[in-house]
Image (spheres, grey):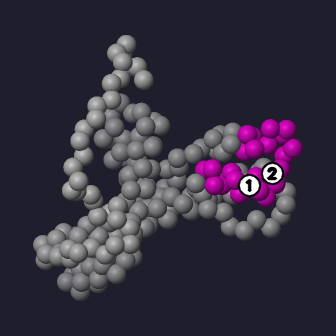
């Protein structure tokens, strides 16, 4: 083996007889050392577990991914102001007072549908529709027809995007913690 014009010369290192080996390589043998978990370590592990559960229940990583994708696709000159406006638009949509701040526009969906229907038949098979929804990351209800017109597929894609975004923006809204906070705030005469 040659690297940068020099010949590779293997070096023989003596391996001692009592060479330490990681216990993870010894399969089937019980560990002679019992792992003691301190109260501090349990607290830290519990905090990590609670943090991960909080993020997962409220779909925070997905929300951040959505916001960053919108930011990158638009490439505004003032990204912080854009993100502020986008979050406001998302909240208005969630409340039912604004349009969908959609990631995909109709023209994007039409292009994807066309790629699944290159012969311009005007319809897609049930299998193609399933693959199309999976490709875009949307969930699809049962498909009962074998041939679905492109117009219906487009309407279903737009609706699926709206539903997915609403679900994302509503994640964690009515958890036990927030409902307790709301009931406590209302009993104290304050609201968030």
Q: Quadrant of the N terminus?
A: top left
Q: What span is in magenta?
A: 113-136
Give coordinates of residue 144: x percent, y percent: 80, 67
Residue 136 in the figure: left or right of residue 31? right
* Figure quadrant of residue 5: top left
Disc 1 versus disc 2: distance between alpha carbons?
6 Å
Residue that protrudes farthest toward the top in the picture: 5
Residue 145 is marked as: none
Residue that protrudes farthest toward the bottom in the picture: 187
In magenta stretch: residue 120: yes
For disc 2, the neighbor class at 10 Å (few under 14, some 14 to 19, many from 20) is many
Q: Is residue 97 visible?
A: no
In magenta stretch: residue 123: yes
At a point 47% along the width and 37% down the height, the residue shown is 73
Give coordinates of residue 126: x percent, y percent: 79, 58
Q: Is residue 184 visible?
A: yes
At a point 85% along the width and 60% down the height, the residue shown is 146
Nearest to the observer: residue 112 or residue 85: 112
Residue picked out by circle 1: 129
Nearest to the observer: residue 147 or residue 84: 147
Residue 23 to residue 39: above or below: above
Residue picked out by circle 2: 124
- Earlier in the chain: of badge 1 and badge 2, it is 2
């Amino acid at each position: 083996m040659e690297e940068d014009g020099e010949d590779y010369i293997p070096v023989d290192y003596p391996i001692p007889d009592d060479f330490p080996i990681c216990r993870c390589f010894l399969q089937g043998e019980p560990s002679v050392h019992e792992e003691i978990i301190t109260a501090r370590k349990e607290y830290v592990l519990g905090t990590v577990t609670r943090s991960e559960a909080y993020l997962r229940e409220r779909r925070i990583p997905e929300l951040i991914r959505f916001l960053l994708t919108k930011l990158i696709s638009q490439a505004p000159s003032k990204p912080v102001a854009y993100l502020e406006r986008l979050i406001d638009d998302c909240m208005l949509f969630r409340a039912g007072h604004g349009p969908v701040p959609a990631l995909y526009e109709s023209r994007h969906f039409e292009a994807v549908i066309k790629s699944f229907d290159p012969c311009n038949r005007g319809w897609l098979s049930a299998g193609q529709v399933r693959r199309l929804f999976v490709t875009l990351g949307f969930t699809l209800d049962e498909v009962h027809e074998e041939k679905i017109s492109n117009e219906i597929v487009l309407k279903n894609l737009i609706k699926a995007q709206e539903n997915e975004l609403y679900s994302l923006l509503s994640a964690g809204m009515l958890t036990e913690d927030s409902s307790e906070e709301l009931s406590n705030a209302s009993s104290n005469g304050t609201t968030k």
